[in-house]
Image (cartoon, rainbow, N blue to C red):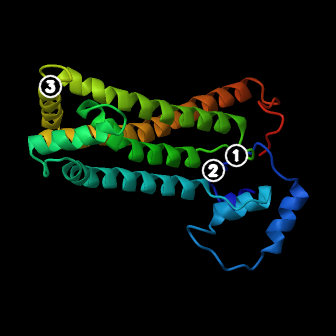
Amino acid sequence: MGEFLKGGDLKTRRYGTRDDADTTMERAEARLGETGYHLVVNNCEHFATWCCTGRSLSKQVRGAGSLTAHGAVAGTTVAATTGVVGAMGAVGGLSGAGIMSGLATAGGFAGGGAAIGPAMIGLGPAVVSVGITQVALRDDETLPQDERKARRDGRAASLVGAGASTLGGVAAISAAGTTGLSAAGIASGLATIGGFVGGGMAAGTVAVVAAPAVVGAGLGAGVFMLSRHLRRTDHRTDSSIEPSATTEGAESD
């Protein structure tokens, strides 16, 4: 091992459940001489995970794919919102009357008015964003318990973040407006919110519509990383106190 490391650090990946050493070695030796390496679909992590569990997976590739997908959702939402709002209303375009007409039409699908229009338009991107997070952080029995629990925390945070941001958008419009959720209040509220990002009513509408998707993704990822860090810190502390003990009987290095 010392010769292999050549002065480098040894780090091991912990598993929740995995196959025995003989099976692992048989799989590894069966692919000696293989030359089909691919960064995305057949990298070293795919190979090592397959040897240990029989499943060809790469957490790094999943993470990169999730970030790319979330970025695409956010970008598409920002780009498409103004067009959708402008096209939905009885008054076309992105004038104040056009935006209010579009939001009223969107809100009408849920039996409401312009106040819940941004929430209705943002529902689709929010659902897609939360879905991406749920897939990226899905449970996997081959992972150690602290990782699985951190993923569970991230999935829950994503749902809570998207839902709270949807309700918060309506509250923000009301709070920023001059007269609550009247037509004039909604218009002034969206204009005020848009002013924070250097725009007007259209920018405010985009911000409120995109918020649930962005917050759901960001909160899910943030809570997952924080939870994983805290649980790993607890694991290391427990191990340093009792070197011979393991936190989970099913875990192995």
Q: Judging from the image, what secondary structure is the residue with disc 2 in?
A: loop
Sequence-first disc among 3 and 1: 1
Left or right for 76, reference 198: right
CB contact under 8 Å: marks 3 and 1: no
Location of mark 3 (residue): 185
Please report the residue visible at 42 percent of the width from the left and 42 percent of the height from the top: 126
Along the line of sight, the residue nearer the viewer: 159 or 64: 159
| 134 over 195 or under it: above or below | below
Residue where numbered disc 1 is placed = 140
Return the residue at label 2.
Answer: 9
Callout in the foreground (3, 1): 3
Residue 199 showing in the rendered view = no
Left or right of residue 145: residue 156: left
Q: Position of residue 229 (x, y in %)?
A: 56, 33
Neighbor class of circle 3 (other Cα within 10 Å; few <14, some 14-19, many 20+) is: some
Q: Residue 33: which quarter of the image?
A: bottom right
Mark 3 residue type: Gly
Lateral position of residue 169 relative to residue 96, left or right: right
- In the displayed structure, 211 sits above or below 74; it is above
Q: Amino acid at mark 2?
A: Asp
